Amino acid sequence: MTTTAPRPPAVPAARRIPTGAAQRLEPLAERLLGGGLPVRVRMWDGSEAGPEDAPTVHVRSRRALRRLLWEPGELGLAEAYITGEIDLDEDLGDGLRAMRRAIDERGLTPPAPGLADRLRAAGTALRLGAVGPRPPVPAARAGLRGALHSKARDRAAISHHYDLSNAFYALLLDETMAYSCGYWTSDAPGYGPADAQRDKLELICRKLGLRPGARLLDIGCGWGSLTLHAARHHGVRVTAVTLAAEQAAYVREQVTARGLEELVEVLNIDYRDIAERPETRGTYDAVSTIEMGEHVGDAEYPAFTRILHDSLRPQGRVLVQQMSRGANAPGGGAFIESYIAPDMHMRPVGETVGLLEGAGLEVRDVEALREHYVLTVDAWRRTLEERWAEFTDLVGEETARVWRLYLVGGALAFEERRMGVDQILCVRPGRAGDAGMEPTRRDWYGAHR
């Protein structure tokens, strides 16, 4: 006689444990993160894992996992987002902010993955059908060659970012075409990015003590916002220097259109070529370099500060507006350095001050503008989102997503004090140590300060 074993009771549908891609990946992800998932993950097969009240990350294809196998970490995640293989339900900024908050609150500290972790990841990917050849690198990624900070490589690095096209930057920026931190002096209705940029340009001119007929050397002039403002509103004779060909062409067009030919000279040269022009040595009343020093390089920065010093006459002033990193922050990171500003170098502001002093300059004032950059980058991002279709038509979906990730990440870095930006005012003292500076800041900000 045979007997049939009783069947186990049926599990109600609501209590069945799903076994999709999300459930297969969850233990591995928690192992690599050092704790529970900080986000909700929805996979290509519709399965989900992670907290229900957290931002939802869509993994839209197996290729995203394959990309992370080949390029683990920040860069692989960024490239999966750029290509649309990963996306967020929420606004990208809100989603990233919530993820960082969850990671901080849970104290997640990812351990260094060992061989066993790598084998486990490869096995999981194999079972999910995600193993295969390396996915193509997005076209927007920089591919620089040659010696670090050689003139040829620096030109290629600058061209990668700034020669994207004048039309792109005209779409992104306000009418000043200032691509640097603004100075937001009002929260009144109608006050916007162009006003903040004009206030920044005027503040720089006041700090430099510019007067009609003075000579200004503008190193890294961008699209000429400071050059044109100083010439038009202060009667200054400006030598504008940029390594980007598109920028030089644009500034020359603007100089002609505004009738400033007798006041402005535009040079499409490397900053190091300034030292080879004997007519520039010790002849300038002022030197400005607005968010260009980040591209100079660590080893090259002392020579850069020497050029700033040597270009000035005694009692001449230099204003450096430059981004910095927190003492324990990495700076740009793999995504920024691969897609936005290759070979970029940032340091804590105190180290830059020390390098300027080491060149013989006297540091007279340091003004932190970190919160101003949050407002500035947010304004650029709003423009990007509001005119998304125009940007994608102009540069394509992938490049537009690169810039969305860049602007969102940049605003968060300034907001969270991982990055800063400062205006550092210096003077080249005279032989007797005299700086020729006013004893107060009254002329910069007004009598109320």
Image: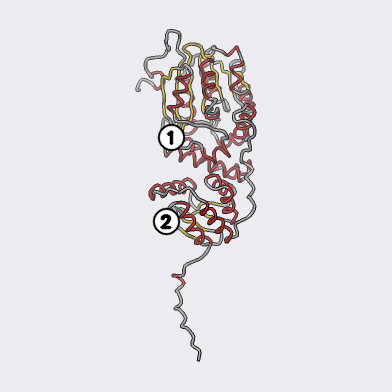
- Which residue lies under the disc numbered 1? 326
- Which residue lies under the disc numbered 2? 53
Give the residue at x 47% y 18%: 208
* Front in this rendered view, residue 75 or 186: 75
Farthest residue toward the front?
115
Give the residue at x 43% y 55%: 36
In the image, 37: left or right of 142? left
Q: Callout 2: helix, strand or loop?
A: loop
Locate the C terminus by quadrant: top left
Q: Callout 1: helix, strand or loop?
A: loop
Image quadrant in which you'd find residue 343: top right
In the image, 121: left or right of 183? right
Q: Nearer the viewer, mark 2 or mark 1?
A: 1
Farthest residue toward the top?
432
Vertical placement of 24 versus 168: above or below?
below
* Front in this rendered view, residue 72 or 85: 72
Residue kind at label 1, given as amino acid type: Gly
* Label 2 – label 1 distance at C-alpha: 31 Å
Label 1 crowd bin: few (<14), some (14–19), many (20+), radius 10 Å: some
Q: Earlier in the sequence, mark 2 or mark 1?
A: 2
Res. 70 mark: none
Label 2 crowd bin: few (<14), some (14–19), many (20+), radius 10 Å: few
* Front in this rendered view, residue 246 or 334: 334
Residue kind at label 2, given as amino acid type: Asp
Give the residue at x 55% y 44%: 75
Q: Position of residue 183 (x, y in %)?
A: 45, 29
Q: Position of residue 326 (x, y in %)?
A: 43, 34
In the image, 199: left or right of 439? right
Farthest residue toward the bottom?
1
